[in-house]
């Protein structure tokens, strides 16, 4: 076994040395403008892929892979044969495992690349429709929230930004409808079968209703909060979504963002927040 291990280690070391020799030769003698362009484009591509994967809440897995690489490097440096042997086996099947784990993300990324809209992944609304549609959607959301607040009808609305909420969307009932204040209010009507849970607004459409959100694990707050507010904070801790809560007891409008719950929103202050967070103004 150790003979095989030594051969594998030697092969890996030789391959690594060959790579650095090639890189050194390429930069010293044969480096051209085309090579520079190639490097820049590859950097942009890998940067987009990395950002896309991180936005898919895979940061912990990426960090785990980096930790394994660090351990492998340390094991090779200090000649720790046991750890090196185990990690070499992990890396041999790692590529296949990553393809399986990230299959939905890889498919979506390729679809976005094919459509030429990588920069528009999970933006609020289709950019081809312009800001007019986005303002209309925001006005519809604010109108619905204002009426629900006046009626003291409990509501929980999550609006996606960059982080995908596909796993949350599929916990509820798929709607896939245009945004309208009437539809939002009907979904939260207390006699509606879909009123208990969250409405997810994704890519400028009402994607799903009666969705289950993760509750925050925090136990200390400056004020007493209910399940809706805990769910709003929980989602804001694991994504960059904007989560709007209407209290059933008081009608107070709150917004959870970046793990922070802010209360006492008015119709206008909520509108200004959504415009700031969801609309990218054109710069001239």
Image (cartoon, rainbow, N blue to C red):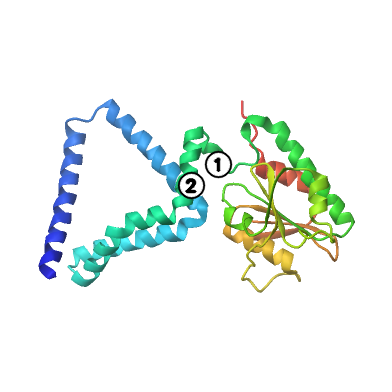
Q: Quadrant of residue 155?
A: bottom right
Q: CA distance from mark 1 to mark 2?
A: 8 Å
Q: Is residue 284 left or right of residue 62?
A: right
Residue 122 in picture, x, y percent from top left: 58, 44
Position above or below: 160 against 211: above
Q: Residue furthest left?
A: 3
Residue 135 in picture, x, y percent from top left: 74, 37
Q: Earlier in the sequence, mark 1 or mark 2?
A: 2
Residue 108 in picture, x, y percent from top left: 50, 44
For residue 121, the mark is 1
Residue 251 in picture, x, y percent from top left: 85, 60
> Looking at this view, is 39 or 123 the one in front?
123
Q: Is residue 22 left or right of residue 145?
A: left
Looking at the rendering, in which quadrant would you find the C terminus?
top right
Residue appearing at x 16%, y 31% in the figure: 29
Q: Residues within 10 Å of mark 2 (few under 14, many from 20)?
A: many
> Looking at this view, is 154 or 39 the one in front?
154
Residue 258 at least partly seen: no
For residue 142, the mark is none
Residue appearing at x 39%, y 52% in the figure: 99
Residue 273 at least partly seen: yes
Q: Quadrant of residue 63?
A: bottom left
Position above or below: 34 against 246: above
Asked if labels 2 and 1 touch by Cβ distance under 8 angstroms, the answer is yes
Residue appearing at x 37%, y 34% in the figure: 41
Position above or below: 247 against 118: below
Q: Which residue is mark 2?
A: 52
Mark 2 secondary-structure assignment: helix
Q: Residues within 10 Å of mark 1 (few under 14, many from 20)?
A: some
> Looking at this view, is 39 or 215 the one in front?
215
Q: Quadrant of residue 216?
A: bottom right
Mark 1 secondary-structure assignment: loop
């Amino acid at each position: 076994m150790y003979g095989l291990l030594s051969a594998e280690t030697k092969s890996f070391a030789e391959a690594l040395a060959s790579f650095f020799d090639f890189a050194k030769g390429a930069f010293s003698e044969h480096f051209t403008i085309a090579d520079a362009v190639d490097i820049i484009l590859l950097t942009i591509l890998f940067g987009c892929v990395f950002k896309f994967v991180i936005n898919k809440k895979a940061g912990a897995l990426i960090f785990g892979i980096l930790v394994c690489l660090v351990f492998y490097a340390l094991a090779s440096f200090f000649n720790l044969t046991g750890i090196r042997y185990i990690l070499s086996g992990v890396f041999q099947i790692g590529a296949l495992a990553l393809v399986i784990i990230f299959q939905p993300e890889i498919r979506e990324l390729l679809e976005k690349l094919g459509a030429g809209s990588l920069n528009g992944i999970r933006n609020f609304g289709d950019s081809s429709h312009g800001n007019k549609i986005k303002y209309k959607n925001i006005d519809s959301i604010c109108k619905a929230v204002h009426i629900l607040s006046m009626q003291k009808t409990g509501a929980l609305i999550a609006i996606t930004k960059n982080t995908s909420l596909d796993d949350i969307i599929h916990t509820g009932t798929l709607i896939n409808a245009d945004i309208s204040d009437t539809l939002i209010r009907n979904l939260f009507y207390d006699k509606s079968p879909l009123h208990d849970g969250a409405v997810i607004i994704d890519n400028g459409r009402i994607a799903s209703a009666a969705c289950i959100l993760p509750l925050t694990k925090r136990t200390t707050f400056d004020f007493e909060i209910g399940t809706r507010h805990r769910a709003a904070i929980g989602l804001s801790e694991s994504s960059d979504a904007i989560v709007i809560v209407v209290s059933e007891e008081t009608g107070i409008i709150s917004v959870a963002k970046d793990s922070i719950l802010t209360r006492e929103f008015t119709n206008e202050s909520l509108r200004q927040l959504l415009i700031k967070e969801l609309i990218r103004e054109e710069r001239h």
